[in-house]
Each structure stands twice: as structure tokens, then as C-alpha cells.
Image (cartoon, helix red, strand yellow):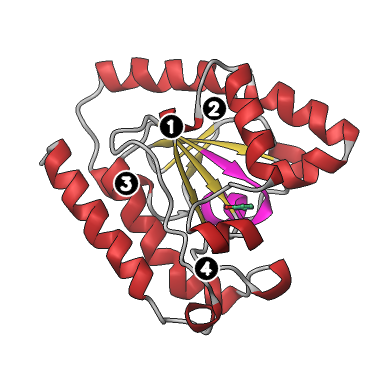
Amino acid sequence: MTMTLDDKRTQLSVLNQGVGACRACPLGTQRTRAVPGEGPIDAEIMLIGEAPGYYEDQQGRPFVGAAGQFLETLLASIGLKRTDVFIANVIKCRPPQNRDPLPEEIGACSHWLDEQLGIINAKVVVTLGRYSLQRFLPGNPIGRVHGQGRKANGIWVVPMYHPAAALHQGSLRRTIEEDFRKIPGYLAEARREAQSEPAQPALAAATAAPQVEQIPLF
Ligand code: URA
């Protein structure tokens, strides 16, 4: 059954409160603020990063530091503002010193992202960095699959390098700029499919599943 926008708003608000109170792993007691994610309830595109950093932890918002500024530049290059997309992370609390998330932290946090995917029901998920890629397309190295959209469990997944990595490496920067320009094409394809297919169950995209249909478009 299709959720109304009001249903979605209510569910997301409950989820945000849940993330704010979550103590399922030690990061929940170490954070300043949890960072559930933000964006329009009916966003067609979801960007999924890795974990909050220092500024995100201070403000409770995703991608508000230097990587976030670069992300906004990338979005602008395809005619989008950050308020046009839903932005979230694989884990919702900052790891100390911005270290990589641990498997147990990712495991404890994964149901929040599953639920967000189900509520927003975006047409395209853009993964930012390795941890997000592994969440959606496990076993695929970023160097091989970046910029190539694939359909996984009914949703288009477009892998990108992490903007923070690209910010400091000239060659990666050009790569992520080129990869970002492919997003509108995948969104157009997803819209075409949505018009010609019956609606899919909302949570179809939530789990990184074995069956990955590989349909490179570009
Ligand atoms: N890097 C991420 O992966 N997420 C953020 O929210 C900020 C930086």
C-alpha cells in the first residue's frame, strides 16, 4: 500500500527521534549529536555517505563540513540543490577521530538506514565512498564500479567515490565530477521504469542482496 506524504513525515519523525535516543552501540554515548539525515520526504535521489564527522556531530546534520561544500558544488553541476535530495549516512553517530566505522557499529545501525530507504522510497541511491558501496553492492571495488549505475533489489544504485577523498586528489575530483553528471540519466531511466511498471514494495531496496541485475547504461 502506498504511504501518503503525511504517513511518511510521521514515520520519519518517529525514526529521527529513535536515532536521537539510540544507544545500540558505544558511539551512541560518545557522540555530541546523532545525525539521522535530512531532505525532502519524497526525494527521488538519496545520497548515502559513511559517517558523521566533526561538524556533522556538532550540528546534527549530514555533510556540513568541507566534503559537504564540495557535495553541494557537485549537485549544482547537475542543476540540484542539497534541499532537492535526501542525504544520510551508513552510520548515524561520529566515530572517534573520524576513524572507519566498525562492522559491529554498521550492524547495529543498519536498520535505521533500511527504514529510511523504505520511507523515502527514492528512485536512485548514490553511494558515497566504500562503506556505502559495500552496503548496497557488497564485494564491488569502488575503483571498478564508480559511475556505473546498477539495479539492486529494484532500485538504481550509482556508486561514487567519497567527496572527501575526491576533494584532496585532483584525479579523483575529475572522476567524481564526471560520475555525478551521469546521475540525471539514471534518474530519467528510473522514472521511465516507474511509469511503465506497477509500484514496487517500498522496502525493496533496503537490503544489500545477492541478486544484482547489472545494466550499465553509460
Ligand atoms: N562524510 C560522510 O560520509 N558523511 C557526512 O555526513 C560527512 C562527511
Q: Dividing the image into 4 quarters, which one contains the N terminus?
A: top left
Q: CA distance from mark 1 to mark 4?
A: 22 Å
User: Residue at 34% across / 52% down in the picture?
Assistant: 116
Q: Dividing the image into 4 quarters, which one contains the C terminus?
A: top right
In the orientation shown, which residue stands out farthest toward the front?
Answer: 58
* Badge 2 element: loop
Where is mark 4, residue-wise?
A: 93
User: Residue at 37% across / 29% down in the picture?
Assistant: 44
Q: Amino acid at mark 4?
A: Cys
Identify the mark at residue 204; answer none if there is no mark: 3
Q: CA distance from mark 4 to mark 3?
A: 25 Å
Q: Amino acid at mark 3?
A: Ala
Where is mark 1, residue-wise?
A: 83
Q: Is the C-beta separation of discs 1 and 3 under 8 Å?
A: no
- Position of residue 185 in the picture relative to residue 116 (left or right): right
Viewer-proximal residue among 211 and 45: 45
Magenta span covers which residues? 126-138
Viewer-proximal residue among 216 and 174: 174
Q: CA distance from mark 2 to mark 4?
A: 34 Å
